[in-house]
Image: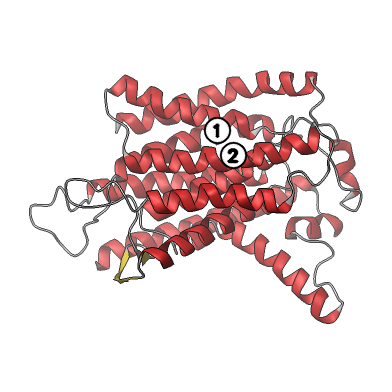
Amino acid sequence: MKQILFSGMIGLILSLLGTPALIKVLAKHGYGQYIRDDGPKAHHSKKGTPTMGGIAFILATLIAYFATKAITGESPTASGLLVLFLTAGLGLVGFLDDYIKVVKRRSLGLRAKAKLAGQSIVGLGFAVLAMQFPDDRGLNPASQSLSFVRDFKWAVGPVLFVIFAYFMIAAMSNGVNLTDGLDGLATGASVMVFGAYTFIGIWEHTQSCAYAITATANCYDIRDPLDLAVVASALMGSCFGFLWWNTSPAKIFMGDTGSLALGGALAGLAICSRTELLLALLGGLYVIITLSVIIQVGSFRMTGKRVFKMAPLQHHFELKGWTEVLIVVRFWIIQGLCVAVGLGLFYAGWVTG
């Protein structure tokens, strides 16, 4: 359990101290946020705020994980490394998108095909690799069975699993990206979900079938649950440190660099901990905000009318006159309730076996 404490604290300290240094570097080079003219007028004051802040917590997470392994003498695991690969890989795609927006002054960033290609290479690469590297019990980082709070009894096969995993990764990355529209909103919500996955990893480790004298109905067959908790703790600590600078009024934005990375991390943790469908509840805020965009676009195309004043949903409430801080705090409350219900169902799944 020392690993979890070390990774969380190291991630927190590195992100808390490293983010202001990154702010200075980005501000010096004029790498500021582009603001849409058709968005809420209050956002115009944010123009020029340094972006690509995801660099800070991605690096803090990576350093925290490997420093923890060096301090404790433990070896990295396939599951932990794969989640970090997915996080850093999608972060790199997001960085290229941000870089083109703010440095090359092309407002749309990466062209759609190039961005899709980058996400596909990383996402599909993770999905394929996650079915490799069996341990001494024959368990791979990912299972070919779909899961809610544990695997269902039927497998979908390698091809359908890769497709499903890629869909999950793309959906969560885009969900976090859409949520990242107000100061601290996506960062604070992510802290809660990573906290939930820290708990889930610890619980699956203590209730692992590997330690049971006889396998019981409520033990867990997960390859590396403790290391998944280490990764989740590092991410939680790093996001906490970043939130200090990202909360209103934000001194830095995470950009696509951060939002794609966080979405990938959440999907990777869900896949490797066998809680794939539970993620839709644990990350309920991302789902709600994504659905608001789907509803808005679908309604306008079918009827020519908009359901919301503006999508994503947080901007609808801005245009209704809610203050930014009020929206963020209330949305955090919604996210906290989603996490509480999700963990409740996870525990209920263990009780019932």
Q: Which mark is residue 58?
A: 1
Residue 214: image quadrant is bottom left
Answer with left or right where residue 29 lies relative to residue 59: right
* Residue 329 visible to the viewer: no
Question: Between tags 2 and 1, which lies in front?
Answer: 2
Residue 294 place in picture, x, y as percent: 70, 68
Kindly identify the amino acid type of the residue bearing the numbered disc 2. Gly
The residues tagged by marks 2 and 1 sit, at their Cα atoms, a distance apart of 8 Å
Mark 2, Cα crowd under 10 Å, few <14 / some 14-19 / many 20+, is many
On screen, residue 137 versus residue 172, left or right, reads: left
Q: Nearer the viewer, residue 4 or 141?
A: 141
Residue in the picture at 45% in, 38% down: 84
For label 1, the SS is: helix
- Give me the disc on residue 266: none
- Is 303 rendered above or below residue 311? below
Residue 325 visible, this orientation:
yes
Report which residue position mark 2 lands on: 91
The quarter of the picture where the C terminus appears is bottom left
**Marks 2 & 1, CB-CB < 8 Å contact:** yes
Q: Amino acid at mark 1?
A: Ile
Q: In the rendering, at what x and y percent does residue 143 appear?
A: 32, 59
Q: Is residue 89 left or right of residue 176?
A: left
Tell me which residue sits at (27%, 23%) in the image.
73
Q: Residue furthest left?
A: 213
The x, y position of residue 282, in whole percent, is: 49, 57
Mark 1, Cα crowd under 10 Å, few <14 / some 14-19 / many 20+, is: many
